[in-house]
Image: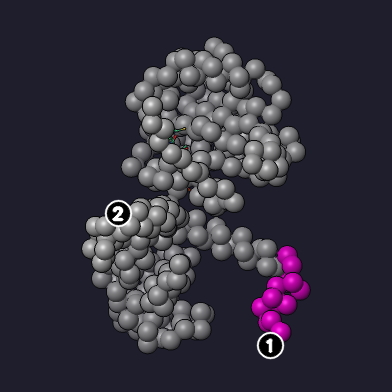
């Protein structure tokens, strides 16, 4: 499964903002942290604002803040504003009314169901735990990590 | 599904091994969640899992002496080549006692026993639509493992 760039940026932004819901972050700060385009990220943040997942704060030092309950908002709740996630619309594909099309549809539905169940059960709070765990593990074996982060050309 | 904790939030609870006399309690707790009273099933589970047999764990959580939840698990070995691992196959917390960390404590209690049994992996199986239980186990850090469940209808 490959998610689109905008979806990835949205997830990074929401995860960063959900780290500390009290704090505001500027689009620039988030873009710098993930080394992504600030322009593209601003567009993504506007979509997240319309979706009610983040709040734009005006005025000097204005930025963005997470809105919602990190223990309830799931990855699916974010992703669905950017791309159809495992949507069961295969019925409209060419040939989908043939026995072959239906059998293929069942296999694809099986994969889609797992994708939805996975993304719909991982909350931002759970993601933050995974992130912290990754950070601890990375700190525990710095040499190995460094080697992997800079593979031999 | 939101269940506010109405049952003495913050009051500490105890976790103890289940006994045969807990049958009615377990049946009621399970019936409250699933809507089905499975007396014969739970009687059998208590006989098999609550007798202090090695590697089988049936634990009850109590608040001030009143049972409010349970968890059942065992160590299973070599099914389809899998080395011994801990299996959780039932968890239940009374609606009024939810979202107070009780599920987490039951999970940790059974994991401690698995660790003492020498296993290093814990597994469970959850209905894909069961968002509550799925989110709960995810929050405990569980991820998909190397097995998938397959099934087929059996024509008579
Ligand atoms: C799943 C269950 C055991 C959780 O028990 P609990 O005591 O509420 O769990 P905890 O308070 O320890 O919650 C742990 C985590 O689970 C998740 N969680 C709990 N309730 C949730 C809910 N309603 N929605 C989303 N996530 C939830 C949260 O991530 C929570 O983390 P937090 O403590 O940081 O908020 C309980 O809801 C239950 O018994 N449900 C029915 C189970 C069932 O159907 N059993 C029959 C088949 S065996």
Residue A54 to residue B85: above or below: below
A142 within the magenta span: yes
Q: Residue at x 39, y 55 (%)?
A: A107
Numbered disc 2: secondary structure: helix
Q: Which residue in the structure is indicated by mark 1?
A: A153
Q: Quadrant of residue B77?
A: top right
Q: Chain of mark 1?
A: A
Q: Quadrant of residue B30?
A: top left
Mark closer to the observer (1, 2): 2
B106 within the magenta span: no
Q: Which residue range is magenta in the image?
A: A140-153
Numbered disc 1: secondary structure: loop
Q: CA distance from mark 1 to mark 2?
A: 48 Å
Foreground pick, A141 / B65: A141
Residue B44 to residue A124: above or below: above
- Quadrant of image for the C terminus of chain A: bottom right
Q: Chain of mark 2?
A: A
Labels 1 and 2 in the same subunit: yes
> Is the stretch drawn in magenta largely helix, strand or loop?
helix
Asked if the residue at label 2 sits under 8 Å from ligand 1, the reply is: no
Q: Position of residue B50 (x, y in %)?
A: 61, 20
Q: How many marks?
A: 2
- Quadrant of image for the N terminus of chain A: bottom left
Q: Position of residue A91 (x, y in %)?
A: 25, 59
Observer able to see residue B28? yes
Q: Is residue B36 left or right of residue B23?
A: left
Q: Position of residue A9 (x, y in %)?
A: 42, 76
Observer able to see residue A17? no
Q: Which residue in the structure is indicated by mark 2?
A: A99
């Amino acid at each position: 499964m490959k998610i689109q760039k905008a979806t990835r940026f949205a997830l990074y932004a929401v995860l960063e903002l959900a780290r500390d819901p009290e704090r505001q972050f500027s689009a620039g700060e988030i873009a710098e942290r993930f080394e992504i385009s600030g322009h593209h990220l601003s567009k993504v943040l506007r979509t997240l604002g319309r979706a009610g997942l983040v709040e734009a704060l005006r005025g000097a030092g204005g930025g963005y803040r997470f809105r919602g309950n990190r223990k309830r908002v799931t990855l699916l709740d974010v992703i669905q504003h950017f791309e159809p996630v495992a949507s069961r619309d295969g019925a409209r594909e060419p040939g989908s009314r043939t026995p072959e099309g239906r059998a293929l549809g069942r296999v694809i539905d099986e994969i889609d169901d797992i994708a939805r169940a996975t993304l719909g059960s991982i909350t931002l709070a759970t993601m933050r735990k995974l992130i912290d765990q990754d950070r601890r593990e990375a700190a525990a074996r710095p040499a190995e990590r460094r080697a992997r982060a800079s593979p031999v050309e | 599904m939101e269940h506010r904790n109405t049952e003495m939030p913050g009051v500490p609870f105890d976790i103890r091994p289940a006994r045969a006399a807990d049958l009615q309690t377990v049946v009621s707790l399970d019936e409250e969640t699933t809507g089905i009273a499975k007396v014969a099933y739970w009687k059998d589970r208590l006989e098999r899992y609550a007798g202090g047999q090695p590697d089988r764990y049936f634990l009850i959580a109590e608040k001030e002496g009143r049972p409010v939840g349970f968890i059942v698990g065992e160590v299973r070995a070599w099914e389809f080549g899998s080395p011994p691992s801990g299996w959780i196959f039932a968890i239940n917390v009374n609606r009024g006692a939810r979202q107070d960390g009780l599920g987490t404590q039951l999970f940790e209690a059974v994991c401690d026993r698995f660790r003492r049994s020498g296993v290093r992996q814990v597994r469970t199986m959850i209905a894909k639509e069961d968002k509550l239980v799925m989110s709960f186990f995810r929050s405990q850090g569980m991820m998909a493992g190397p097995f998938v469940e397959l099934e087929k209808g059996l024509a008579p």
